[in-house]
Image (cartoon, grey):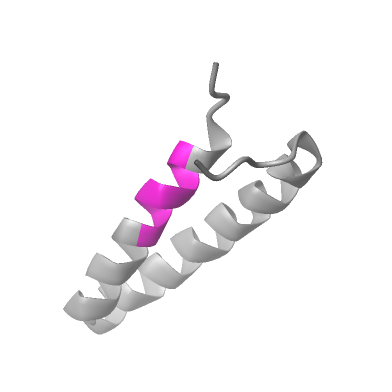
């Protein structure tokens, strides 16, 4: 299982913010394939942000 260092959590937040901006642009441009890919990446990123225990 991939372990994320607590030091990396702020960076993951930055990545999420960037992906959300890219998703908004993709929606505005009707880039459906891009939206799907971004959604998959966001879902994975969000699972990495949660503490495991």
Q: Is residue 47 left or right of residue 35?
A: right
Image point (29%, 77%), residue name: 34
At 54% from the left edge and 54% from the top edge, which residue is drawn? 16
Q: Quadrant of residue 41?
A: bottom left
As drawn, is 5 to the left or to the right of 1? right
Residue lying farthest top? 53
Asked whether 34 or 53 is in front, the reply is: 53
Percent position of residue 8, x then y: 74, 46
Residue 47 position within the rendered picture, expressed as x and y whole percent measured from the top left? 44, 38
Q: Is residue 33 above or below residue 17?
A: below
Q: Is residue 36 above or below residue 2?
A: below
Q: Residue furthest front?
A: 1
Residue drawn at x 18%, y 76% as measured from the top left: 32
Q: Is residue 40 left or right of residue 50?
A: left
Taking the magenta stretch, the answer to whether it contains residue 8 is no
Horizontally, is 9 left or right of 30 in the view? right
Residue 29, by quadrant, is: bottom left
Q: Position of residue 7 (x, y in %)?
A: 81, 41
Q: Is residue 18 above or below residue 25?
A: above
> Which quarter of the figure is the C terminus placed in?
top right
Q: In the depicted view, which residue is nearer to us: 10 or 20?
A: 10
The image shows residue 24 at horizontal and vertical percentages of: 38, 67
Say above or below: 39 vs 30.
Answer: above
Disc tally is 0
**Magenta span: helix, strand or loop, mainly?**
helix
For the point 30% across and 69% down, the residue is 37
Specify the segment rendered in magenta. Answer: 41-47
- Quarter-of-image position of residue 39: bottom left
């Amino acid at each position: 299982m991939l372990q994320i260092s607590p030091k990396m959590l702020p960076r993951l937040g930055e990545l999420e913010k960037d992906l959300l901006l890219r998703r908004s642009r993709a929606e505005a441009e009707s880039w459906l394939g891009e939206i799907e890919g971004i959604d998959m990446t966001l879902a994975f990123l969000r699972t990495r942000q949660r503490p495991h225990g």
